Image: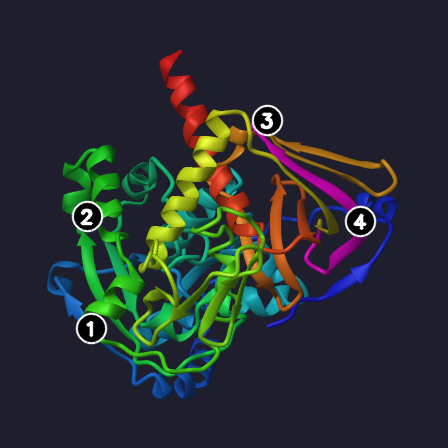
Amino acid sequence: MKIKTKAASYDYVMTLKKPAHKRPKRPSILFRTLIRLLSIPELMSTKFEFTKERMDEAGEGPYLILMNHSAFIDLKIAFKIFYPMPFCTVCTSDGFVGKRWLMRQIGCIPTNKFVTDLTLITDMLHTVNKLNTSILMYPEASYSFDGCATPLPRGLGKLLKRMNVPVLTVMTEGAFLHDPLYNCLKKRKTKVTARLTCLLTREEIKNKSVEEIDSILDAAFSFDNFARQYETGTEIKEPFRAEGLERILYKCAACHSEGTMRGEGTHITCGHCGKIYEFDTLGRLKALSGETEFEHIPDWYRWERECVANELINGEYLLDTAVDIGIMTDYKKIYMVGEGRLIHNADGFTLTGCDGKLSYSHPPLSSYGLYADYYWYEIGDVICIGNKERLYYCFPKSKSIVAKARLAAEELYRLKKQETVKK
């Protein structure tokens, strides 16, 4: 999927007004049917099936449907499971660019990722209370990088209590393996399944504390796709399965150099020390010579997180890279305003550019996570920062830094929160 872009001056973009807010619309049966029909080919190719648990306890809708986020097939899965039941979908605001009318017709509710958005809460309450329509939401807000769950926002239980509707979960298996984000949207042959569960009834939400509900959500969104692949003996035989793997494994486990890893074919190689790892059909890594530091990709990724955390604690962390800058102000285009510089350190993000006209700072506690993506709308890897007024899409000229930036943002938020609590 691509997105509309336009080269424009920074001065021009600053004159553009933010689009007026519109309440969500109940999706029409015409568009629900169309999406359902368009979903059939890919679901058939993955031999999709799903099971149900506790659905006899769910009661009448509308529902809040929480789904893990692995790949674009997720939405197709949702329409397979719930059709013809109408539901609105909370989606990233850039999904409206160039197709606002269509997105409203299919019931999408836009929000800026990892930006405090009180309007979203009122829109969700309007959807369930006034439109009597269920809502599909991806609480992780971003695709999984390493096949494991990404952090959920704290206090999500407060929203569930305010909405006062049954909560369903849709947890997929095989969707990540079918179309992992790091693999440049190259789809692989594997079976995809899902489990539909009534996670919380109205009565259970009423009787549980916010902390208890958050704990239940954390447990529900605890998974490891690579571990599951190995346990079930699911083979991925495509010869390109290691391509793009350096997007996750950006730091060599042997020599600790960064930005030197290259995933090609079925191997990932360090360009600094020359160490080569084979990525086998069961999702495991094996060094062709010497020690295999990490067989399991999430273990390697977890080690990178620990390294980033130590850099932050020791005052050593710094990201400083040239970027191409896109800005979203309205829903017509992503306006490419030129080049700039993105710096990330213990003080958060700072973006400058456009001949000194652009200067934006994003403090560490602005958000618990970072909107970072691979091969974003087929343009390139991106780091997005901003606020409710506008978003800045930064396309780094340096390779393999997006994952580290995301880890650093998450760890920096955690450390700053700990400091706040101690005070």
Residue 399 position (above or below residue 363): below
Q: Which mark is residue 339?
A: 4
Q: How far apart are marks 3 and 1 (CA)?
A: 44 Å
Looking at the image, is 7 positioned above or below residue 370? below
Quarter holding the N terminus is: bottom right
Reply yes or no: does residue 342 show up in magenta: yes
Residue 24 percent coordinates (x, y): 50, 56
The residue to which callout 2 is attached is 202
Q: What residue sits right under mark 3 in the picture?
A: 347
Residue 113 seen in the current view:
no
Point out the tag, 3 or 4, that comes first from the N-terminus.
4
Q: Give the range drawn in magenta.
A: 330-346
Question: Could you tell me residue 190's position as x and y percent?
Answer: 33, 81
Badge 4, how many Cα within 10 Å: few under 14, some, many 20+? some
Kind of residue indicated by mark 1: Thr
Instruction: Provide the major secondary structure of the magenta segment.
Output: strand
What's the distance in space between the residues labelled 2 and 3, CA to CA?
42 Å
> Residue 366 vs residue 158: left or right?
right
Dot 1, crowdedness within 10 Å: few (<14), some or many (≥20)? few
Tell me what residue is drawn at x 40 percent, y 39 percent. Answer: 306
